[in-house]
Image (cartoon, rainbow, N blue to C red):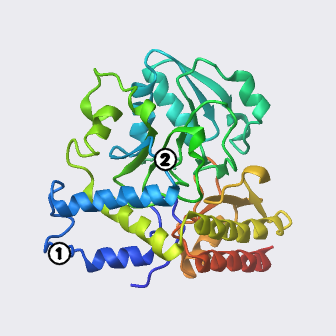
Amino acid sequence: MERVYNFSPGPAVLPLSVLEEAQRDLLALPGTGISILEISHRSKSFQSIIDTAEANLRKLMNIPDNFRVMFLQGGASLQFGMLPMNLLNGKSADYIVTGTWSKKAMGEAKKIGSINCVWNGSETNFNHLPTTEELQAKLDPDAAYVYYTSNETIQGVQFPTEPEVGRPLVCDASSEFLYKPIDWSKYGCVYACAQKNCGPAGVTIVVMRDDFVAASPDNLVNILSYKTMSENGSMLNTPPCFAIYIFKLVTDWMLNTVGGVDKMYECNQQKAALLYDVIDRSNGFYLGHAEKNCRSLMNVPFKMATSDLDKQFLADAAAEGLVSLGGHRSVGGFRASIYNAMPLEGVQKLAAFMEDFMKKNG
Ligand SMILES: *Cc1c(COP(=O)(O)O)cnc(C)c1O
């Protein structure tokens, strides 16, 4: 069967060359005669895969030596609980709520300890970001950390630069990780589940500064402790071998085919501009959700003035091989997720389709 252009928010499109390589080596990893699905995580071959995954990531993202890299399970959602369990130590934390995912993260953190909501954009259905003044007015100088979600996958709201809080940030970067370089001096932790922008479901990449890792209390269950997981090289127990392997292939692809994160960022800007341009020139036929200064380069939610033509739009798009464009129920309309692995041609085709649909129905 032919592959289509898959605009799913997650699990999402992977680079074709990655899938082909995984397919080629599925029965026997080079030099082993054993499938990645069968191999011991204690084998030399697997150790080399996880080491290369980390080395690739460090090189791509220029991660300083005082940060640890962990490959964990439980999705991004486990981090919602694990972060406060490890980092609060009797203090409170500041949360910036800019969409569904930061709201969920705050809800979970509240079960663990005392949480201060610095800003909440729910009144306008999360279509914009706080100003620096709004943020700074509510920050607690004694908070253990300041938490935010750099790209809200559902509302398509993305921080163009880090919020200015003057203290180390903890960031859920699930739906944008590896989309552009990161200024690590601003962070205590950046984490991301892989299945949006850098791999399949099953692994969450946590990059955490040494002093944050050291904060884990000793009475935590081992598997919930950053300190223990990090000391054991993410292999306290069986790690998600296959997901880590695919993440390694994705980082190989970014280094060798894309040519690095700066190149990726240029391409991501170009792709997003194609869609926002159609929306902006449509005279209100298409309406974007987020305000212009925080529109996401990764997830582009938009709708039409009424929902009468929604089904038609999705059916016509699918007929052209453009799929998974339905919007989240909380926002309505459509959402085009155009992650790193979505080729420029896929976005060009969608932009042309949107123009064409407007001409026929506008
Ligand atoms: C998808 C997503 C999550 C949840 O990820 P799971 O791995 O399903 O727990 C959290 N945060 C963001 C920003 C996401 O896009």
Which x, y percent locates residue 117? 62, 25
- Left or right relative to 41: residue 216: right
- Left or right relative to 46: residue 165: right
Q: Secondary structure at mark 1?
A: loop
Residue visible at 69% across and 59% down? Answer: 302
Observer able to see residue 261: yes
Which quadrant does the N terminus fall into? bottom left
- Left or right relative to 143: residue 159: right
- In this view, the residue farthest toward the front is 65
Answer with mark 2 or mark 1, whichever residue precedes in sequence: 1
Residue visible at 64% across and 39% down? Answer: 98
Marking on residue 31? 1
Residue visible at 28% across and 62% down? Answer: 49
Which x, y percent locates residue 129? 72, 41
Q: Secondary structure at mark 2?
A: loop
- In this view, the residue farthest toward the right is 283
The amino acid on which the numbered mark 1 sits, given as a three-letter code, is Gly
Image quadrant of residue 351?
bottom right
Crowding at label 2, few (<14), some or many (≥20) Cα neighbours within 10 Å? Answer: few
Which x, y percent locates residue 271? 66, 70
Circle 2 residue:
64
Q: Nearer the viewer, residue 135 or 57?
A: 57
Q: In front: mark 2 or mark 1?
A: 2
- In this view, the residue farthest toward the top is 90
- Left or right relative to 248: residue 303: right
Above or below, 252 against 345 in this view is: above
The amino acid on which the numbered mark 2 sits, given as a three-letter code, is Pro
Marking on residue 346? none
Q: CA distance from mark 2 to mark 1?
A: 32 Å
Is the residue at mark 2 in contact range of ligand 1, meaning its CB lies under 8 Å from it? no
Observer able to see residue 5: no
Q: Looking at the image, how many numbered discs can be counted on the residues?
A: 2
